[in-house]
Image: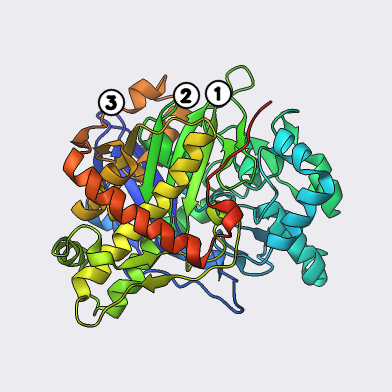
Amino acid sequence: MNYLLGYDIGSSSIKVALLDADSGRCLASVTSPKKEMEISAPLASWAEQRPERWWQEVVNATHELKQTYGFDATQVAGIGITYQMHGLVLVDKNGKVLRPAIIWCDSRAVEYGNQAFEGLGEEYCLRNFLNSPGNFTASKLKWVKENEPAIFEQIHKIQLPGDFIAFQMTGRLCTTVSGLSEGVFWNFREQAIAQDLLDFYGISRDLLPEVVDTFAEQGRLTPEAAQELGLHAGTPIAYRAGDQPNNAFSLNVLQPGEIAATAGTSGVVYGISDQPVVDARSRVNAFVHVNSTPAQPRNGMLLCVNGTGILNSWLRKVVGEIPYDEMNQLAAQAPVGAEELQFLPFGNGAERVLENRPTTAELRGLSFNIHGRSHVLRAAQEGIVFALNYGMDIMRESGVQVRKVRAGNANMFLSPVFREAFVNSGNVELELYNTDAAQGAARGAGIGVGLYASPAEAFSGLERILTLEPTPQLQEQYHSAYARWHEALTQQILSPTTTSHHVAQHAF
């Protein structure tokens, strides 16, 4: 028997899944820690985590998985890694971490990205990077250069969170083209490192790791890492991808026109295109997809709402640490529209969909005589969906057709209220599948080591478990609720010049 291991390096937890490579079935999975990992915010708009904590939870999860299933580690054919995108890990020449990782929802580098967007020229950036440099990894590195020069001088290589975990496993410092694109280190037109952006920021190309293929051997477990994990030395790491490209991959979303969604700590809709189409205001962003090649380019257009599962998690603490399924049941007790209570879920760093404006979450229309827990919980779920719908409108106007969406049966898609609101407010068909990010990473490793000749073989175990379509009566109710929510968004966050959702479409 051949096994495959997939690791999902999230900001809330680490998940590892064990797959039977022959049947494609998930045999067991474990999440560690059981309580969500902390995100440190030393200053307003900052968000940091210690990479060493990620590694410790990888070790913990692996040991628990072995205790749960008792598999033979010598039969693990390959390991895949998926990870929280846009983070910045810095290591010195000895491989020591120099500072806490600056993670995806950290907003400190917005101004540096704005300066590069203006200095290099908006047209140039959109034509070459398909994005504003914004608050992405390259801009975070510029922040370190300007604000922590003593640390910057010690940097040997920068890493994304998944690169760091792979380095801990193999001792090899490397990344992928898809990973470089998520940090705006990639020039799409030249199919090369974004040298002009590095030059503008005064950053040496030598700080970037070696580039390896997404589906390929990227190193092997060292004896030291194998002993710590309880695995077999020499096991290949054969797949690596950021969480959203990997979520799409885990759902077999690989071809133009296919759409994936997820609603974990952040909420994302991710559509595949074979054309370099961009949003002129960089509210939705293009990255290199996992199966892209120079001959057959595949880009993922990504819409992200930071304040998604983290809002639900925050509410859980407020209402008394009740189980999430009980929260979902309570939310269903309130009517559609939560009796005109609106939740703006923008309280987790600068939101790209709002052009990186500094924002906070808001609960509007609260009446002590009308609203209770169920209304607040429903308003939160609807608010998240409405924020995603707002972004899907931008995606549609930029050329991505959002009609049928695939998602894993996990996180907020477990909520009937969330699913109903998503389908009816967005006018989309929703397909839910029996998969998650860790399983997707394991399947990717199967391709990388050659157990599967194609994605079609890798997804033999993927099953659709539910399909939902909009209904006219519910659509009318949700469209009215969305209109009220959008009015609240306009009043509190958007200036009058940005409410029309106008997107200048560029195809280069």
Three-letter code, disc 2: Pro
- Which residue lies under the disc numbered 2? 256
Q: Quadrant of the N terminus?
A: top left
Q: Residue at x 26, y 79 (%)?
A: 367
> Depth-wise, is mark 3 or mark 2 nearer the camera?
2
- Crowd band around label 2 with a 10 angstrom C-alpha radius: few (<14), some (14–19), many (20+): some
> What secondary structure is found at the residue carrying circle 1?
loop
Q: Is residue 42 above or below residue 73?
A: below
- Which residue lies under the disc numbered 3? 460
The disc at residue 52 is: none
Quadrant assignment, res 378: bottom left
Horizontally, residue 51 falls left or right of residue 248, namely right
Pointer 3 or 2: first along the chain: 2
**Alpha-carbon distance for marks 1 and 3?**
25 Å
Image spot of residue 98 (x, y percent): 69, 68
Horizontally, residue 83 falls left or right of residue 140, namely left
Q: Is residue 470 above or below residue 31?
A: above
Q: Residue at x 37, y 72 (%)?
A: 363
Three-letter code, disc 1: Asp
Three-letter code, disc 3: Ser
Image spot of residue 77 (x, y percent): 40, 35
Q: Residue at x 27, y 71 (%)?
A: 376
> Depth-wise, is mark 1 or mark 3 nearer the camera?
1
Q: Residue at x 30, y 56 (%)?
A: 481
> What secondary structure is found at the residue carrying circle 2?
loop
Question: Mark 1 near mark 2, Cβ–Cβ under 8 Å?
Answer: yes
- Which residue lies under the disc numbered 1? 274
Residue closer to the observer: 344 or 209: 344
Residue closer to the observer: 34 or 508: 508
